[in-house]
Image (cartoon, rainbow, N blue to C red):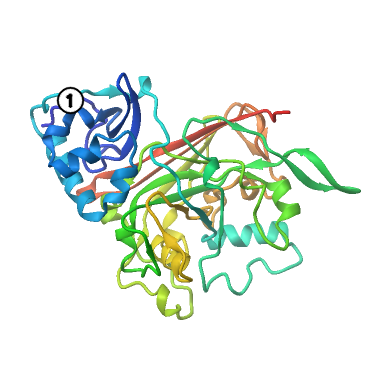
């Protein structure tokens, strides 16, 4: 029986001892690296004496940057020691539990490069039919490589950060018009936080040594701006204004029981995309719009794993560095209730969604709040949690 007296800290709960995600919280002494235990944060700096000298230096930092750079051996050693500490019957000297409801979180690491992929066939086909009703839903290259684009790391924000409605150009009846987006949307995604040594041409087998952990992502999207600008070069202002991520990073090691094969593409992969072990993940998401559950996407159907995405991202000689972030792309399933964007759920605005309070929505209105949660199966029937990503829409500024 653990010394942590929190009903949410149990194996059948998302944030029990099988999960232990890392974040950064505000304390009286300043920002501190912490792990989430149930509905509490456990700052690690006061426990530095419980670790080796190397690990003590990492947990005493005010961000996860040093830990990300330390690499897989340090990540594994720290996780093993933390499991010992939080499952012990007596609290270690200096341990303090901070209720999450009373504790502020920070963006836990310095975001380096940011790449967003487009790896859900159902999403790609749906968007293709909506944007190109008379053309091909999915282009021939799509199933052969993880399609993606480079985003803006400077607009990645932590869960709970308000999102201002963006301005941009959109198509009008008599040519382009400029102003606030009128078709503001979300994209429910899973993100991967990179760490370890700087590397290039990372193989699929080496990819796990360069991925520290997993986060929920909301890739906010201005569909009217996107539809006007995306030909011929793809996403730009319709995507670059904000991307929200969860405040707590669940270690990749926590997903050992959630690994699955990615779907068969129906043709051979290029050699560099062949996996010698499965790195698809059986993650289940839920999307809440002003408290109403509107979608339940499943990540297991994604056409490419994170290992294949990272291999493709670096195959041209590009580097991966600690703090780099890449996201899966919108997660959508074959059924309507599994669509991970409101563009799809409302089918381009033609089929409004009714919320629990009777309000109808096609796209986001000012004041709307979106919360995305996710879980995965853990060892011995336990549950692995990914922290929620939440955000509220503010009116466009001047």
- Residue 11: tell me if it is visible: no
Q: Where is residue 285 in the image (x, y as percent from the top left)?
A: 44, 45
Judging depth in this view, the residue of 249 and 67 nearest the camera is: 67
Q: Position of residue 188 (x, y in %)?
A: 51, 46
| Residue at 70% across, 57% down | 230
Q: Based on the displayed image, in which of its 4 quarters is residue 93 positioned? A: top left
- Residue 165: tell me if it is visible: yes
As drawn, is 253 to the left or to the right of 224?
Answer: left
Q: Which residue lies furthest to the right in this view?
A: 174
- Rendered position, 232 above or below 5: below
As drawn, is 103 to the left or to the right of 364?
Answer: left
As drawn, is 322 to the left or to the right of 122?
Answer: left
Where is the N terminus found, in terms of image quarters? Answer: top left
- Rendered position, 347 above or below 11: below
Judging depth in this view, the residue of 276 and 178 nearest the camera is: 178
| Residue at 12% across, 26% down | 91
As drawn, is 365 to the left or to the right of 190?
Answer: right
For disc 1, the neighbor class at 10 Å (few under 14, some 14 to 19, many from 20) is some
Query: Circle 1 — which element?
Result: loop
Labels in figure, total: 1
Q: Position of residue 184 (x, y in %)?
A: 66, 40
Judging depth in this view, the residue of 141 and 194 nearest the camera is: 194
Where is the C terminus found, in terms of image quarters? Answer: top right
| Residue at 37% across, 52% down | 322
| Residue at 68% across, 38% down | 166
Q: Mark 1 points at which residue?
A: 95
Q: Position of residue 130 (x, y in %)?
A: 70, 56
């Amino acid at each position: 029986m653990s010394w942590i007296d929190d009903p949410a800290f149990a194996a059948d709960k998302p944030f029990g001892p099988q999960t232990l995600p890392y974040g950064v919280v505000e304390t009286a002494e300043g920002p501190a690296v912490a792990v989430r235990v149930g509905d509490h944060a456990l700052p690690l700096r006061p426990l530095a004496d419980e670790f080796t000298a190397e690990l003590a230096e990492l947990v005493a930092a005010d961000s996860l940057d040093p830990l990300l750079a330390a690499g897989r051996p340090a990540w594994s050693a720290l996780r093993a020691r933390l499991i010992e500490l939080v499952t012990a019957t007596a609290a270690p000297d200096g341990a303090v539990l901070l209720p999450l409801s009373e504790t502020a979180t920070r963006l836990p690491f310095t975001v380096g490069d940011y790449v967003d992929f487009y790896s859900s066939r159902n999403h790609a086909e749906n968007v293709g039919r909506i944007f190109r009703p008379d053309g091909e839903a999915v282009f021939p290259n799509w199933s052969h490589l993880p399609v993606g684009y480079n985003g803006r790391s400077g607009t990645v924000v932590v869960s709970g950060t308000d999102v201002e409605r963006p301005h941009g150009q959109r198509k009008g009846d008599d040519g382009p018009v400029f102003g606030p987006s009128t078709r503001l949307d979300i994209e429910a995604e899973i993100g991967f936080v990179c760490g370890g040594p700087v590397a290039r041409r990372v193989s699929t087998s080496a990819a796990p040594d360069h991925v520290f952990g997993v986060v929920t992502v909301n890739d906010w999207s201005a569909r009217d701006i996107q539809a006007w600008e995306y030909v011929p070069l793809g996403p730009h202002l319709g995507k670059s204004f904000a991307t929200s991520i969860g405040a707590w990073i669940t270690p990749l090691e926590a997903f050992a029981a959630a690994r699955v094969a990615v779907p068969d593409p129906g043709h051979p992969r290029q050699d560099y995309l062949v996996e010698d072990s499965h790195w698809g993940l059986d993650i289940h998401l839920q999307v809440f719009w002003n408290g109403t559950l509107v979608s339940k996407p499943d990540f297991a159907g994604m056409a490419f794993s994170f290992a294949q995405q990272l291999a493709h991202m670096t195959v041209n000689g590009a580097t991966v560095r600690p703090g780099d972030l890449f996201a899966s792309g919108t997660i959508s399933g074959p059924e309507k209730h599994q669509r991970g964007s409101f563009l799809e759920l409302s089918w381009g605005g033609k089929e409004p969604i009714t919320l629990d309070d009777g309000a109808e929505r096609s796209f986001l209105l000012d004041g709307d709040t979106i919360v995305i949660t996710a879980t995965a199966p853990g060892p011995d029937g336990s549950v692995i949690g990914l922290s929620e990503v939440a955000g509220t829409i503010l009116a466009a500024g001047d």
